[in-house]
Amino acid sequence: MEDVLIVDGDNIINSWPELILLKNADYLHARDRLVEILKDYQGLVLNNIIIVFDAYNVKGGRGSRQEMDGVVVVHTQENETADMYIEKLVGNLLPGKTTDKVVTVATSDRLEQGIIFGKGAYRVTPKELLHQIRMAKHASSKHMSKGKIHFRMDTHIKHKVRDALERLRRGD
């Protein structure tokens, strides 16, 4: 089972105090900082993370999708809101709700929360996500400070890669 965290990027930027301050000085810096925070978090929790930024009002915007160190960053196209993209993505990830995938959407938008609940996804508020990130960092630093570093490769690679390596090992 691969868990997926979908983050409404602009919603988070407008909710976290650190990012609000950065946004007021330089929006692009705030966006880059959010991506960095979530890349670090992805390294701790190993979820698939997709950050969606709204380019609804960008004239001629084609949209983009880029992977950056295990985190997918999406910019919507012209006339497509981040909410529209997220709703469509949740629908694609959870077709008929008959999957083992756990999809969580980070947003404070109540309407969006209701829609994604209806599609079978969970929601986490920006405040809850920030708390989860802080707890993961704390647990990681606590674990590292004890000197107990147990590296198991199978816990750090995607399921498909692990399965392919296992088939190679068995000679299948």
Image: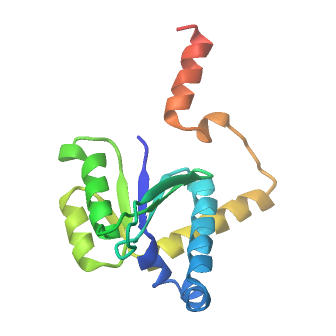
Residue depicted at x 25% and y 63%: 116
Q: Which one is in front, 122 or 32? A: 32
Image quadrant assignment for residue 1: top left
Name of the residue lying farthest toward the front: 60
Residue 77 seen in this snapshot = yes
Residue 82 sits above or below residue 94 on the image: below
On the rendered structure, is 92 left or right of 171?
A: left
Q: Residue furthest top?
A: 171
Q: Residue at x 26, y 61 (%)?
A: 87
Residue 119, percent from left and from top: 21, 57
In the displayed structure, 19 sits above or below 122; it is: below
Q: Nearer the viewer, residue 153 or 145?
A: 153
How was the colour assigned to the protein in this rendering?
Answer: rainbow
What count of labels does the image hold? 0
Q: Position of residue 59 (x, y in %)?
A: 38, 73
Q: Position of residue 151 (x, y in %)?
A: 72, 41
